[in-house]
Image (spheres, grey):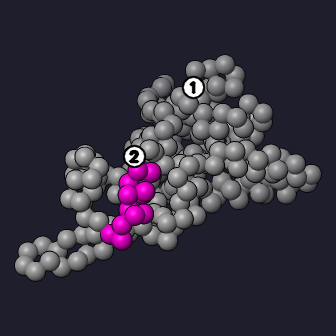
Amino acid sequence: MTTTPLSQNDQAMIELLRGSPAMTVGELVDVMGVTATAIRQRLTRLMALGLVSRSQAPEGRGRPSHHYSLTTEGLQTAGNNMGDLAVVLWEEVQQIPDPELRRRVISGVVERLAEKYQSAAIGKTIEERMKSITQLFSDRQIPISVEQKDGLPIINVSGCPYPTLAKENRDICEMEQNLLEKIVGQPLDLCQCQQDGDQCCSFQSADRDLEIQKDLKPNSHEPVIINR
């Protein structure tokens, strides 16, 4: 089951599809009262997360219509994000007495999350890939932006995704840095951190000479090749 937090709009669409075997874009527009463009954008996000599937149904002459329905994973999606569960799980991981085992567990979590999110990073340059994942964070109601600083692209995360956890243990900051590095395909430096009193957490490209030579294919976990 996906652990990705969903926006209120996405949750509303899931609940609507939960009560219907399949709906068209037009039907969703009528019920939700938004534009067809907005509906398609939400459907695209939910399909990328594996929560919604699309099927084609012929309707006599003309173009066939597309119907959207929840996948098995979508049907299992809870309406609320269990933030308390994440806190408890993290606390339990920190209680593992063997440092090496604890490191391997955290590393495994980062790898699994990276596999889930890598397809959202699109572009040939580091800056393009950074910008492409801002929508991923925005959909999870995490304010994020990308800018240039000293000639290098930098990701600014204004709202910590794990505020409760970060206050108690800085390891969560390192985990977030490792995750972003795997998604964009390049080492990053944590140059600002809210836990140090800064306004946001900032992750800057670590080396101006590094350049992505190969894009990840959609829905592929093939590693990014980096020339040094």
**In the rendered image of this protein, does residue 118 appear above or below residue 75?**
above
The residue singled out by tag 2 in the image is 9
Q: Residue at x 66, y 54 (%)?
A: 110
Left or right side of 14 for 168: right
Q: Residue at x 66, y 19 (%)?
A: 197
**In the rendered image of this protein, does residue 23 appear above or below residue 8?**
below
SS category of the residue bearing label 1: loop
Left or right side of 55 for 212: right
Left or right side of 87 for 66: left
Quadrant position of the N terminus in the picture: bottom right
Type of amino acid under label 2: Asn
Q: Residue at x 42, y 67 (%)?
A: 70
Identity of the residue furthest to the left in this view: 61
SS majority, magenta: helix
Image spot of residue 188 (x, y percent): 59, 40
**Residue 200: mark:** 1
Magenta residues, start to end = 9-22
